[in-house]
Image: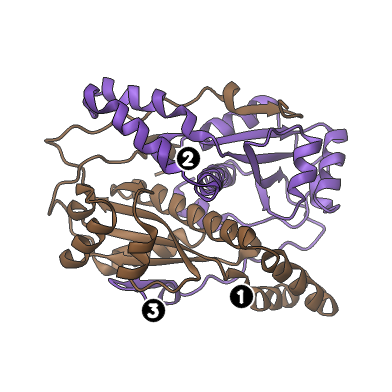
Chain colours: A purple, B brown
Amino acid sequence: MDVEEALRRNRPTAWFEPDGITLSREMIEELIAGACQAPSDFDLQPWRFVVVRDQERKEILHQCAYRQVIVREAAAVLIVCGDTRGHDRVAEIVAEKVEQGLVPAADAPRVEEGVRSAYEVSDRNRLLLAARGAAAAATALVLLATGWGIATTPMVTFSEDAVRRAFHLPDRFLPVFLVALGMPSTSRPQPVRAARCPVARVVWHEDGPG
Amino acid sequence: MDVEEALRRNRPTAWFEPDGITLSREMIEELIAGACQAPSDFDLQPWRFVVVRDQERKEILHQCAYRQVIVREAAAVLIVCGDTRGHDRVAEIVAEKVEQGLVPAADAPRVEEGVRSAYEVSDRNRLLLAARGAAAAATALVLLATGWGIATTPMVTFSEDAVRRAFHLPDRFLPVFLVALGMPSTSRPQPVRAARCPVARVVWHEDGPG
């Protein structure tokens, strides 16, 4: 499915058909591998995914997500996390750029230090690194799944602390979204997507409004 | 271009061909309209875009972005902002859901209040709302542009304060990315994209590592 169509068709599913579709471990890993090609800060790829397919684990996640029915009825739910220490990979990324002739070897330490200090400077910057990364990967994953005929519901309503504890996430990982995957119910009402804001309401040309 | 291919092909362009391509105001608005179909928290669509095509304005943005050459040589640069007050639209979104029979009219005030309070509770949650929104829209835009044969470079290295001041952005809008658009230079080296992490390094099944 082309990008335009995936963008037009994607929408949060309100109800899944329990047992409507089985998503194999391999299929979900393929989906994640595709999503990992999304762009990220300095190509750091600051994301992690917990794949929840087991019914008992889904019940636990359902509790963490304020008992939203969709979590227990989905074929699988991904906990999409951002990595607040994603910049720890910078040496690896810069080494590749040196090899490609994009960064002179002599400049590598300076470039590395620049990226590292951009994130070391504040919790806020590390939070943004993680949130941007998880959101880029989740968006790519939703579009890819839409193309494959798998319905998705990205969710932000859950207890971050409860998810961390129940799924043993070290502090550096920020759970940003739950993405529920499955087959839409045909017997329960599905949302027409909210109307899009007209472009004129979200675009300014050359200068902001302030 | 299908989603898989757009994901495989997208990569940050290191050098643009100055005057290599002209991007009309209409074409950029069409791109943005497509990107605005990305998923967002409660469908709030918490994003705004400043389109910078004028050469003098690009020079100003170039200063705000620590004189990165790519900003002045791009055909256009978008300042992709998140809206930390995106939840102010919740009444509009919930009214649509009531109309669609997804939320009983009697529950609307409670649902609205739930969404509003989720963001009113902390600066952190409003920052995450804005960052997630801008990242989702920027990712969709990059994939769409890739499909249209337009090269993109999403950037996070710029002075937030300088951009705010020079482009008159009210406090509620968080500039999250600059996305430079143009035609790749054929005479200067372009990056092969950083190697992707193997899936096994970013996925956990059923439980995290902690």
Residue, disc 2? A120
Q: Secondary structure at mark 2?
A: helix
Residue A210's tag is 3
Horizontal side of residue B179 vs A30, given as left or right: left
3D distance between C-alphas at marks 2 and 1: 34 Å
3D distance between C-alphas at marks 2 and 3: 31 Å
Q: Which quadrant would residue B191 be assigned to in this image?
A: top left
To which chain does the residue with label 1 belong? B
What residue type is disc 1 on?
Arg
Callout 2–callout 1 Cβ contact below 8 Å: no
What residue type is disc 3 on?
Gly
Which residue of the protein is positioned furthest toward the front in this rendering?
A121
Q: Is residue B38 visible?
A: no
| Label 2 Cα crowd, 10 Å radius (few <14 / some 14-19 / many 20+) | some
Instruction: State which mark lies toward you, 2 or 3.
Output: 2
Marks 1, 3 in one chain = no
Q: Is residue A27 visible?
A: yes
Residue, disc 1? B89
User: Tag 3 or tag 2, which sits nearer the N-term?
Assistant: 2
Horizontal side of residue B131 vs B7, given as left or right: right
Quadrant showing the C terminus of chain A: bottom left
What residue type is disc 2 on?
Glu
Marks 2, 3 in one chain = yes
